[in-house]
Structures are given as C-alpha cells and as structure tokens.
Image: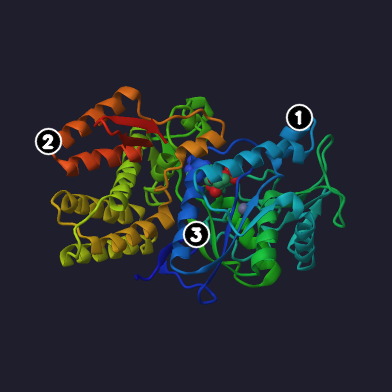
Amino acid sequence: MHEIQVHNTLTNKVEPFVPQKAGEVKMYTCGPTVYDYAHIGNFRTFVFQDILRRFLKLRGFKLTHVMNLTDVDDRIIANAAAAGVSIRDYTAKFVQAFFDDCRTLSVESPEHWIRATDHINDMVGLIQTLQKHTYTYDSEGSIYYRISKFKDYGKLSKIDLTGIQAGARVDNDRYEKESARDFALWKAPKAGEHFWETPIGPGRPGWHIECSAMAMKYLGETLDIHTGGIDLAFPHHENEIAQSEAATGKPFVRYWIHAEHLLVEGEKMSKSLGNFFTLRDLFGKGYKPSALRFALASVPYRRQLNFTFDGLQQATNSVERLRNFAARLKNEKFAAGGNAGMGRLIAQFADDFDAGLADDLNAAQALAAMFDFVREANIAMDKGEFRQAEVAPAQKFLADFDAVFAVLEDNDAEKLKALGFATGSDADDAEIEKLVAERQAARQRRDFAASDRIRNELAGRGILLEDTKDGKVRWKRK
Ligand code: AMP
Ligand code: ZN
C-alpha cells in the first residue's frame, strides 16, 4: 500500500497524511446551508469528501466524522421571516431533500449529523471564552471578532491585510477577500426575525461560530481533517481558525482539504444563465444517480470539474461497462486452474488503483487502473484465457474499487423510485428485442461466449432472459 498524501491548503503543499492518533481520523465537513435544494456543484464537494472518507475507511482508519447542517444564516433568517414561519419549519423540507439526495448519490452518513440550531449554547459558550480572552467587542447589540488581535489571521487564505482599517466591520455572513473586516460572532435581533435569549444578550449567531463550536464539541480542540469547497476557505474557514485558536491556543486543524468548483459547460453555474441543476433536474431528464456520482467523482478534486451532458453520458457508459464486467465475472464459467500472467496483472492494477487514490485522491489515475484491468480481463475472457483462480482476486479488486466509488450495485431504479420518479429499464423494447435476437443467432451458430456476453449485457440493464423448452426466449424487466 502506498503512503497517503493530501494537499493541505494551510501549507499549500501535498503532504504525507499522518493523523494525531494512529489509526483514527477526526474529520469535519461543512454541510449545506439548507435554504434551498442543494445543486450539483454542492454535490461535487460532498462526493469528494465521501470519496476521502471511504478511502480512509478502506485503509482501515476509524473515522469520527461530523457534518453540520447550517440551518441558521442570513438567507435562512430572511426567507423564514418573509414566509412568516419558524426557522425549523422553513428548513425542514430542504433538510429532508438533502438527506434524500445524499442517499441517492451513495454519500455515506457521517458518524454525527448535527444542526446549528441545536448548538446555540455551545456557540454562546465559545463567544464567552473569546470575550474573556478580549478578542471581541460589542457594537449596537452585536458582538464582533477583532481580527487585528489574532496575529495569524489570513494564514489559510493568504490574504493581504495591509490597508485594512482596524475596527471596520462586516455584518454579512458571506463576503469577498477584498472586504476582510471584523466579522459578527453574534448579531443583534432585527424586527420580525427569529432570535434567541442568551447570557450574551438576545440575537442569533453569525455563520462562522457554528462550525468552530460544533467541530470542537464533537472532535476536540484539534481536528485531523477539515473539508469543504474552495469558496469556503475565505472567509468561513479563516474565521473558524481565528475563533478556535484564539479560544484554545492550539492548532485547530492539521489538514485543510478543499475541493475546486464545478462549472457547467465551462461557465459558472447560475440561475440567470439557465445552467443551474439540482440532482432532481438531471434525474428528471433520465440520467441515473450512479452516472452522476461517477461524473462527479471521476475528476481529481483539485481540478475544476467541467460538467457537460456529454460527460454525463460517458459516465453512464462507464458505469454500465463496470457493471457488465462484474456480472460477467459472477455469471460466466471459467476453465479451472489459474493464469499466472493474469494474476500478476490484477495485482499490478490493484496496486496502481491504490497508488492513484493515495496520491492526493487522484481519481483519474485510480479509474484508469480499473478500466485498463477491465479491458485486459475482457480480452482474456473472450479468448478463454481467464481462469477460475483469478475470479476471487478480481472480485476483491472490484469490491475495493466499489468501497470508494460506490457505483456497481444496480440500484438506480430503486433510488429514483424512492425520490418519486417513475422508472423502467432504460432500454426500450425494440432495443431489447434486437439483442435477444442477436443472442439467439449466436446460440444457433454455437457461439456460446457471444450468447453469454449478450445475456450479461441484458442482465446489466435489468433484463432477465428465460429460455423456454421449445427453444424460444422470454424476457422480462427485473
Ligand atoms: P453552501 O450550502 O453554500 O454552504 O455550500 C455547501 C458546499 O458546497 C460548500 O462546501 C461549498 O463550498 C460547496 N460548493 C458551492 N458551490 C460549489 C460549486 N459550484 N462547486 C463545488 N462546490 C461548491
Ligand atoms: Zn462550516
């Protein structure tokens, strides 16, 4: 196995990954802000952190992984107030949709799913510690963090602080690097908006304090890994460091790992450009969850991912190819004995796969190893050179692959049904009839390898064949 290396935004270097405690990883992921449905850009980041999580687990690490739901921030407060409902009522639908989407994309649940609004007391406690350490000041009922007091401010995002006026403040939760200012830890109540009565006064938390308070509550003062999309590095993660380290005097996070953004056909995804997609938009167009997961996972996380419909179609084909191969391995009968050459190839490809993921999660390299293997093995099977002894190691390689990529199980139809989409097999009747006829022709000329291949291909697409006594074939959808 290869040494795991990851890119750390803090040092801007690819470094060997060594957790604080051997064999254990404490990891935090900033979850969604549940003011709307998550889009496929968000899921680029959530699939990335899932691949990281799954790879660490495959390597035997015990994970304690926390993901939060930001269910209080500027947009949620404003939208809930406009709708005249409580924050909980406003966010409930989007929380449920997010959980459903994660399940549909096979994004594993972290050990702790937590909500910001369940942790107001923890945030208040952390703000009180910061007050005690004189990192804060009050203004008109709000409490601000004094960034000039924290000498390391900017170490993550490398912002240039020269020219920033001491005491200039920002009230918004989200702002650009150019507007680096003292930020709000606690915001005074505004008419018509939800607030909490607390020992530091009435109000509601700023966005940044929630992740510091919750991460340290569940994971301790120093985490091994903190992940999120690259846009969170500033100001969110910079402010998390400032809050946490000012409170504890200890390093907050050892490895900051950020995913680059998803673009759509080369452009930023935005509602006004009409290129803004939720998962449900794509499923409504007939694409499968496994294809979307594959498309999101297949580009190394530090490269921008250019989402295209061509790419999604290719991902569909890639998943199909893998499933067909897995079915072939399971269903075909191979000659007894072993083939040492094939045995060595499997070991080599499995090692390349591991090397790819260990190298800062290079998904492209890992997938190339898997697809090269599938090609070689299919050729050997066609020639009758694949032997029984290689089935188990080949299946082990596929299982390791799928422990990380999670696309082999043929469960798209079920998942879509659970989301309320009507589904059937993706193949239309004419296409199936054509393949069935081809298989019959192959059987008649006693080409059983070809006939089995077609049977497996149909099986991979959810079509079961039954040979009747009178030499005919019936087919049905699984
Ligand atoms: P939000 O719900 O806005 O807090 O975002 C949830 C996660 O999605 C964060 O980690 C963001 O950095 C990430 N994110 C937002 N837009 C994109 C995008 N276009 N591509 C990749 N990740 C994104
Ligand atoms: Zn966060």
Looking at the image, residue 291 sits to the left or right of residue 127; the answer is left
The residue indicated by pointer 2 is 445
Q: Quadrant of the N terminus?
A: bottom left
The quarter of the displayed image where residue 359 is located: bottom left
Q: Nearer the viewer, residue 448 or 85?
A: 448
Q: Amino acid at mark 3?
A: Arg
The residue indicated by pointer 1 is 82
Q: Nearer the viewer, residue 435 or 325?
A: 435
Q: Amino acid at mark 2?
A: Arg
Q: Nearer the viewer, residue 10 or 408?
A: 408
Q: Which mark is residue 37?
A: none
Q: Amino acid at mark 1?
A: Ala
Residue 306 appears in the figure? yes
The residue indicated by pointer 3 is 53
Q: Quadrant of the C terminus?
A: top left
Looking at the picture, how far across and down is residue 290, in whole percent?
Answer: 43, 42
Q: Secondary structure at mark 3?
A: helix
Outermost residue on the top side: it is: 430
